């Protein structure tokens, strides 16, 4: 990051809370990267360009929306939807809610990464801000039982309202310091310090104090490339995430007529009841099917039964085997004309696979299996299925 030779004064480093500013347009050129947009370079800006894992600021510049901000060839390029006159003075207004959230997320990530580094010695090897939260990748494994402790320590640092500072120490001084960095650095390096918690080389913008972060919640932990990937909700997004979860729990609570703290037990009871009902339904189906199969005459060339939806692949296979006792080949279908049918097609004496291929071709189906039974699905009507078996010759 070559700030010394940049034409633009970077106000966001001087004051991360600056929302409005005035500046002179140094250049405005059609964007080579974004269609129907322009790249505007200013003599000073409070708009942060994407970098260091942090997304770019949005806002308004000279009455024109700023959709993105990129650093290109050492210059801060504001991507605008309309051109701005060169050498003109313009007013810029940063989208503050977005900037604050990004600072909360970035500072929160520093706090947690610093704690993980102190406790385990792990490095932060990946950091991403997205619509669904923040992800942080560490190069070592963290036990699920340790997550509550990490979350508690991170929030204690937040609630302590510690100062967050940034400076550019001389190389001789920096070489004697201990700090986190994803790679070896030379030249001017910006170090961001969270008091008693973390020191990290970073080009992003952060809150002035940890208290502005608000809160941090670890949402999930997954194994990732020999380490772990943590998904976090931080700052205002943590409150929004909690609101979404609360809405879901409230709806479930109302549907189950259960108090919110008791919805998990209510769902478990509902699952047990559902399993019991399914077992009873399956037993009733078996009895009904057995009665139907018993009534069929024996010695037929082929048999085909078309049933309503709901039969499982296991039930289809079992029922097909029972029908094969009555005929040289037998098939059972479960479904309806609008959604299609699943099937099992078998024989106790013939290789059924060639006839399965005929079935799939005739009834727009797919599937396969062994010599005694093939299974799959078709996109055909019950009438077309019955007509196929009426004409089938083994």
Image (spheres, rainbow, N blue to C red):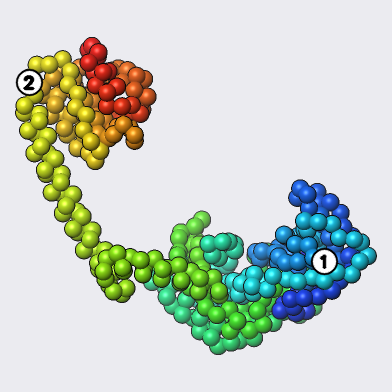
Q: Which residue is mark 2?
A: 297
Image side of residue 97 versus residue 143, left or right: right
- Mark sitting on residue 314: none
Q: Secondary structure at mark 2?
A: loop
Quarter-of-image position of residue 174: bottom right
Tag of residue 62: 1
Q: Residue at x 54, y 65 (%)?
A: 133
Whether residue 315 appears in this view of the structure is yes
Neighbours of disc 2 within 10 Å: few (<14), some (14-19), many (20+): few
> Which residue is drawn at the image coordinates 14% and 26% (left, top)?
323
Residue 367 in sight: no
The percent position of residue 391, horizontal first and vertical second, equals: 25, 13
If the image is split into quadrants, where does the C terminus sit?
Answer: top left
**Mark 1 vs mark 2: in front:** 1
The residue that appears at 58% across and 87% down in the rendered structure is 161
Q: Is residue 103 left or right of residue 277?
A: right
Kindly give the residue lying farthest to the right in the view shown: 87
């Amino acid at each position: 990051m070559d700030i010394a030779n940049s034409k633009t004064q970077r106000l966001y480093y001087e004051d991360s809370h600056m929302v409005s500013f005035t500046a002179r347009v140094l250049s405005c050129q059609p964007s080579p990267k974004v269609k129907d947009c322009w790249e505007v370079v200013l003599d000073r800006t409070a708009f942060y360009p994407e970098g260091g894992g942090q997304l770019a600021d949005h806002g308004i510049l000279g009455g024109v929306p700023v959709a993105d901000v990129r650093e290109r060839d050492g210059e801060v390029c504001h991507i605008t939807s309309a051109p701005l006159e060169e050498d003109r003075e313009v007013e810029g207004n940063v989208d503050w809610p977005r900037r604050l959230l990004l600072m909360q997320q970035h500072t929160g990530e520093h706090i947690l990464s610093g704690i993980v580094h102190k406790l385990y010695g792990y490095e932060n090897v990946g950091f991403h801000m997205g619509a669904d939260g923040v992800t942080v990748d560490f190069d070592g494994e963290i036990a699920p039982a340790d997550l509550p402790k990490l979350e508690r320590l991170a929030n204690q640092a937040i609630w302590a309202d510690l100062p967050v500072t940034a400076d550019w120490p001389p190389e001789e001084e920096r070489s004697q310091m201990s700090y986190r960095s994803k790679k070896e650095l030379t030249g001017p390096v910006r170090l961001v310090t969270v008091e008693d918690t973390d020191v990290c080389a970073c080009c992003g913008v952060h809150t002035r104090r940890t208290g502005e972060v608000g809160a941090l919640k670890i949402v999930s932990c997954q194994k990732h490339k020999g380490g772990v990937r943590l998904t976090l909700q931080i700052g205002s997004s943590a409150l929004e995430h909690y609101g979404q979860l609360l809405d879901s729990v409230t709806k479930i609570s109302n549907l189950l007529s259960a108090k919110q703290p008791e919805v998990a037990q209510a769902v478990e009871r509902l699952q047990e009841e559902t399993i019991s009902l399914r077992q009873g339904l399956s037993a009733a189906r078996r009895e009904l099917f057995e009665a139907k199969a018993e009534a069929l005459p024996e010695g037929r060339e082929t048999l085909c039964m078309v049933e309503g939806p709901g039969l499982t692949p296991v039930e289809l296979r079992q029922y097909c085997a029972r029908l094969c006792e009555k005929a040289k080949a037998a098939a059972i279908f479960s479904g309806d004309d609008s959604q299609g049918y699943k099937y099992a097609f078998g024989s106790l004496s013939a290789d059924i696979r060639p006839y399965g291929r005929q079935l799939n071709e005739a009834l727009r189906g797919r599937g396969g299996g062994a010599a005694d039974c093939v299974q799959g699905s078709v996109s055909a009507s019950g009438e077309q299925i019955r007509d196929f078996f009426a004409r089938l010759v083994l």
